[in-house]
Image (tube, rainbow, N blue to C red):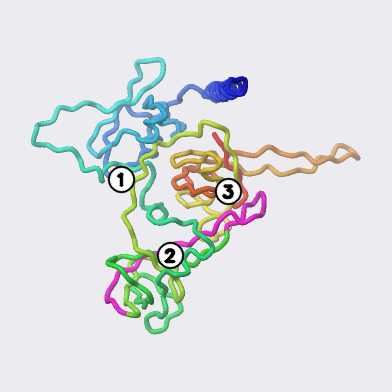
Amino acid sequence: MIRIISALLLSFSTTCALAQDAKPLQLAGSAPNRHIVVQGDTLWGISGKFLKEPYRWPELWRMNQEQVKNPHRIYPGQILVLDRSGADPQLRIETVKVSPQIHAEPLSLAIPSIPQSDIEPFLSKPMVLDEDGLKDAPKIVATQEDHVYLGPGGRIYVSGLKGPAKLWQIFRPTKPVIDPETKETIGHEAFYLGTATLVAEGEPATLTIASAIQEIGVNDRLVPATRAEIISYAPHVPTKKLQGEVAAIYGGVNETGRHSIVTLNRGSRDGVEAGHVLAIYRNGGERLYRDGNETSNIKLPPERYGLIFVFRVFERISYALVMNVTRPVVVGDIVRTP
């Protein structure tokens, strides 16, 4: 019983500490009184119109924890109204009377939390696999006119292609993801290259490259493309203090910027979930300080320079979209609860 009470007190203390850290909501300087939702809007984009800190969207809506995970669907044509009459601002959907013959928007048109086009390949198929996760997948065995690499419009020939799918996603075989803190392998990541459409069945089958973010060649693997689900989590901060690092930048580059994808060395076992917004910091490093004949090393504090949005979570790894940053993101940068 004492242990149970102690655990409850600890949980209560943590909740209170986080609540005390919360500052009053700050509206954006040009926050409108109302906003008409249009196709192409995202929850994050609309949040930025109303708030200086877009990740505090659930507070503006007065959402509870369950509503954060299953927020109100917002559709093009709806009108969002900002109520400034209370002690804290509140956002609501304006109630409009419609005639019986007008039907609600289809569910597929509900706006996503973040730009869907930037993350769609990462939603429809797992990106963190076993070391041999793509070993048995269909593979490219030849290219049009024996080119080393091809782009959109190029013809490829694929061995082992089976099933009714007409559209396929193309991946490069997996590479290990190394934790920058522990230096251990925390997963194997498949690199997404693009899509291809089936032209003719056979062994090998003939396909045409429909899209590509990098050149495609022999030994790259294919998996059937599936429809990606809209990320319905509202942008929100973790309820506990989290801290990790950027383990990799998707594409193997040294640095990246806004609307790029980064891999974090924290996952579901650490309490990370889809929809989490984390602040990103650059380690301050050390500086040599001289005072006469004496010198000392001064350790500078980390400097916050932006926000990232977690959209896909595995046990030890998660993927995040870089949102607002004032400098390039590099491997080893710190991420933590804002």
Question: Residue at point 54% right, 55% down?
Answer: 249
Mark 3 crowdedness (10 Å alpha carbons): few <14, some 14-19, many ≥20: many
Q: Where residue 207 sits in the image (x, y, percent)? A: 32, 74
Question: Residue at point 52% right, 48% down?
Answer: 315
Q: Where residue 289 sits in the image (x, y, percent)? A: 81, 40
Which quadrant is the N terminus positioned in?
A: top right
Residue range in magenta is 177-202
Label drawn at residue 193: 2
Spatial separation of the CA atoms under disc 1 and disc 2: 25 Å
Mark 1 crowdedness (10 Å alpha carbons): few <14, some 14-19, many ≥20: few
Which quadrant is the C terminus positioned in?
A: top right
The residue tagged with tag 2: helix, strand or loop? Answer: strand
Give the mark nearer the N terminus: 3 vs 1: 1
Left or right, 326 with reference to 56? right
The residue beneath circle 1 is 40
Magenta residue check for 15: no
Left or right, 152 with reference to 37? right
Mark 2 crowdedness (10 Å alpha carbons): few <14, some 14-19, many ≥20: many
The residue tagged with tag 1: helix, strand or loop? Answer: loop
The residue beneath circle 3 is 265
